[in-house]
Image: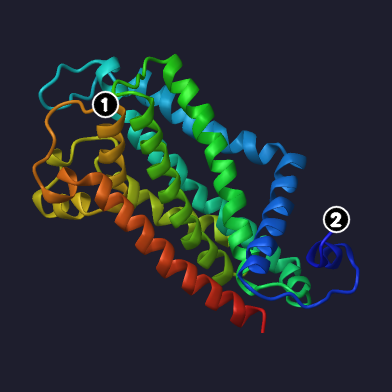
Amino acid sequence: MTTATEHAIGGAVPRQRRGLSATLHDSWVVAKRNLRRMSRIPEIVVFGLMQPVMFVLLFSYVMGGAIQIPGTQASSNSYIQFLMAGIFAQTVTFATAGASAGIAEDMTKGLVDRFRSLPMARSAVLVGRTLADLVQTAFTVIVLALVALAVGWRIHDGILKALGAFVLLLLLGYAFSWIGALIGLSVRSPEAATSAGLIWLFPLTFVSNAFVPVSSMPGWLQGIAYWNPFSATVQACRDLFGNQVGPVDGVWPMQHAALVSLAWSVLITAVFSWLSVRKYRSAAG
């Protein structure tokens, strides 16, 4: 049976709905709308897959033999074990730009005005969008894992720990999608949202342990890299995948990487979801 929100989206007269269950339902309706849009425009998914796959191939075959991890000999195989946690984390965080552009596009097309006329929770629009982005990100991670297995990456500590690593990755990606939502609500065009959604991610991902050991960085930069939420997630995934190559840095965030990664994801989600919903409410009048 079609509900009030779905009727309203289709053009019928809306009726009032309240409560947590209604909010969750409204969020799912918006999420399904965005998922249907992705299925109708497969280029969104295809081009989202191309960049991480290219990173895997370029880093493993072009630079893998030239980069040496402390305590190991330089080889493409050892580097791919070190690299993949960073590529996975980069993939889920770079999805932020897509979230920014998508929300900015909805704003410029007047979809906010349409949603504000419906009997739905204001937060449902953003929750639904971020959930749809999470589903797309999960699909991208699955395909990327298959590519990584094809080029020599392996899971060494069992499937349960590996699933735990993927959960941490998706939690980080979901947290960052709320940053993307705030950016998309704050700019005036999808093009600006894409640029704003990417520009801050490059220093975040490269000032980390994703591609080179933190010990190779200048001393003043190492502290930033160690406390970077991106670094914590990468280190946690290496631990859970059994891909730790070389010694683990003795600093606290790296010794408790899974806990730090989870704490960062919860904190970022809490702060930026509140800011995003507040911004959406003001944008919607």
Question: Left or right of 191: which side holds 41?
Answer: right
Question: Left or right of 283: which side holds 225?
Answer: left
Count the marks: how many? Answer: 2
Query: 180 or 257: nearer the eye?
Result: 257
Above or below 65: residue 274: below
Position of the N terminus by quadrant: bottom right
The quarter of the picture where residue 122 lies is bottom right
Q: Residue at x 41, y 69 (%)?
A: 271
- Which residue was labeled with disc 2? 1
Above or below 92: residue 12: below
Position of the C terminus by quadrant: bottom right
Badge 1 element:
loop
Query: 218 or 102: nearer the eye?
Result: 102
Q: Residue at x 31, y 36 (%)?
A: 237
Crowd band around label 1 with a 10 angstrom C-alpha radius: few (<14), some (14–19), many (20+):
some
Q: Residue at x 63, y 38 (%)?
A: 45
Question: Left or right of 120: which side holds 82?
Answer: left
- Which residue was labeled with disc 1? 242
Say which amino acid is labelled 2.
Met
Crowd band around label 2 with a 10 angstrom C-alpha radius: few (<14), some (14–19), many (20+):
few
The quarter of the picture where residue 210 lies is top left
Say which amino acid is labelled 1.
Gly
